[in-house]
Amino acid sequence: MTKAASTASVDRSALVDFACALADAARGVTLPAAEAGLLCEDKNAGGVFDPVTEADRAAEQAMRTLIEAHHPDHGISGEELPARPARGPFVWSLDPIDGTRAFICGMPGWTTLIALLEHGEPVIGLIDAPRLGERYVGAAGVARMLGPGGERPLVAAACTTLAEARLSTTDPHLFRNAEAEGFERLRRSVRVTRYGYDAYAYARLAAGTIDLVAESGLSPHDLNALVPVVRGAGGVIGNWRGGADLSEGQVLAAATQELFEQAVRALSRG
């Protein structure tokens, strides 16, 4: 059976709705936990602080339970729990709390990241910001936001020059050596830089209020959901060398192709 034949009968809109149901299930765990202020553990003891809470694990389990019940052939690759192999082309990528540092500090910008991969490629992406009541969804080449004001399409900004750009990264101190030098060149080239937003920065790029995001060291769970959202809004997402391969965890997202190419030159010049 060919790939086209094996997936031809899949209801894609139903899968988008199901991704939203997964986000609702995660909210049912994470929002009460955020209010309670849970303690965290360090997954990387002795290295760079990498926090995890019981809410991470419980939210992922809530989503896994739904997938196992409704899509038993789908694989599951989660940030906190062991992977479940697929019996077909589809795998769910789950990051129950992206931005755990923000979560444990009571800041509202943490998100839940959900992606559906088909033959290894993300075809549905969802960035959910529970404390803000915002949900960003990308699929089939379009993106939309569901929030307190209702639903609206997402369209990236028209910025084409670094001098006019609004840049974001989670933490510039996470960069080392050549990456740190490249990011500093980029930072000096743009109009304004904001820190600490994790995946929410990509959501805001899709919404048109951020123009550039540059990061490195991302895992597949960190980035799979971002791709359909950014591209669905008309943005560009690739690596610091200008290619599309994100397997090394180095990510550059831009509102326009012109801006992406200028950012690649700034990051790589040396």
Image: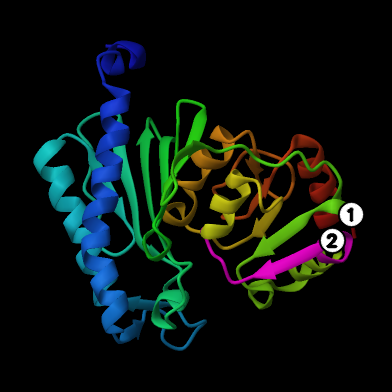
- Kind of residue indicated by mark 1: Ala
- Kind of residue indicated by mark 2: Arg
| Residue 232, x across and y down, in percent | 54, 33
Examine the rendering and report whether any part of residue 18 can be seen: yes
Q: Residues within 10 Å of mark 2 (few under 14, many from 20)?
A: few
Q: Any magenta on residue 188?
A: yes
The reply to whether discs 2 and 1 touch (Cβ–Cβ < 8 Å) is yes
| Residue 81, x across and y down, in percent | 24, 62
Q: Which element carries disc 1, helix, strand or loop?
A: helix
| Residue 127, x across and y down, in percent | 43, 51
Residue behind mark 1: 163
Q: In which quarter of the image is residue 3?
A: top left
- Is 194 on the left-hand or right-hand side of 23? right
- Is 153 on the left-hand or right-hand side of 244? left
| Residue 89, x across and y down, in percent | 30, 29
Question: Which numbered disc flags the more N-terminal residue, 2 or 1?
Answer: 1
Q: Any magenta on residue 79?
A: no
Quadrant housing the C terminus: bottom right
Q: Quadrant of residue 80?
A: bottom left
**Residue that appears at 24% across and 29% down:** 88
| Magenta residues (range) | 186-199
* Residue 191: image tag: 2
**Residue that appears at 65% across and 46% down:** 208
**Residue that appears at 59% across and 46% down:** 207
Q: Which element carries disc 2, helix, strand or loop?
A: loop
